Amino acid sequence: MKNIVVFIDESGTLPDPKDKVVVIAAVGTKTPERIEKIIKEIRKKTKLKKRAGELKFYTAGDKTKRLFFERIAKEEIHIFILSIDKMGRKIPDTYENYAILCWLLLEKVLEFYKEVRQIIFDRHFSKVQDINSFNSLLEDLLQRSLKIVHVDSKKDKKVNIADMIAGAVLAKETGKEQRFYKLIKNKIVSERRLNWPAAKRRFF
């Protein structure tokens, strides 16, 4: 497959002890413009266009989620999931720790696609130095050069697909609900679950 664009975002946070699990989702597609079209249509149908907010799993209503996942389930996309059990830890949200998790996720993405045109992250760090250090470490871990872009999801709404899917998986992982996860389950190529110590051992 060529001309693949991969969107990445997470649900749950590393440092917050209340979040027992963090889910990172990667979504690959040859037609990112279709993702943008779907999000615009859903925003229009649910009147999200009149709000400043984004299409986010934990702020969207049930109708919005249902419309989104029903539409996405019909698209030619591939989903890759990494769920991390924090084992009760408060994990520092550093570029190094985030790069480790994204490396473990992208291993599976790049095994499947072999090559991708672009990897788009919902911006995780505000400092340019942290972004550059993250990019450099991620490329070192994967042992290849990549075209990595970090975007503001309020401006580039296509990346919201990764947030929505990560949120649906986290809802399933925490036992809150499985409805939306079930709608996209057959699109999942890889779904890994590790605890934080095991993930860290891979790095060292």
Image (cartoon, rainbow, N blue to C red):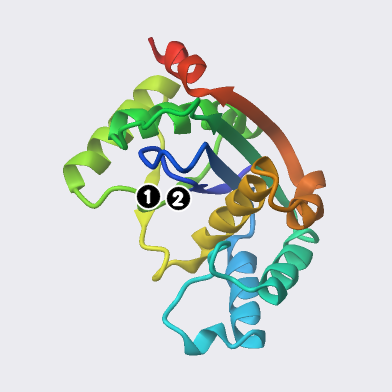
Q: Quadrant of residue 2?
A: top right
Q: What is the C-alpha distance between the residues marked 2 and 1?
A: 5 Å
Residue identified by numbered label 2: 120
Q: Does the rendering let one see residue 1?
A: no
Compared with residue 160, is residue 102 higher up or lower down, i.e. above or below? above
Which x, y percent locates residue 89? 41, 28
Q: In which quarter of the image is residue 1?
A: top right
- Local secondary structure at mark 1: strand
Quadrant containing the C terminus is top left
Q: Which residue is drawn at 49% across and 90% down?
A: 50
Which x, y percent locates residue 63? 71, 76
Which x, y percent locates residue 190? 69, 32
Compared with residue 191, is residue 187 higher up or lower down, i.e. above or below? below
Q: Which residue is drawn at 37% across and 58% down?
A: 151
Q: In which quarter of the image is residue 164?
A: bottom right
Which of 63 and 185 lies nearest the eye of the viewer? 63
Tell me if mark 2 has few (under 14), some (14-19) or many (20+) residues whose alpha carbon lies within 10 angstroms of its own.
many
- Local secondary structure at mark 2: strand
Q: How many marks?
A: 2
Residue identified by numbered label 1: 149
Which x, y percent locates residue 134? 30, 35
144 left or right of 62?
Answer: left
Dots 2 and 1: beta carbons under 8 Å?
Answer: yes
Compared with residue 191, is residue 10 higher up or lower down, i.e. above or below? below
Which of 93 and 138 lies nearest the eye of the viewer? 93
Q: As shown in the figure, which amino acid type bears the numbered disc 2?
A: Ile
Say which label, 2 or 1, has the lower sequence index.
2
Q: As shown in the figure, which amino acid type bears the numbered disc 1?
A: Val
Q: Does the rendering let one see residue 119?
A: yes
Which of 136 and 9 lies nearest the eye of the viewer? 9
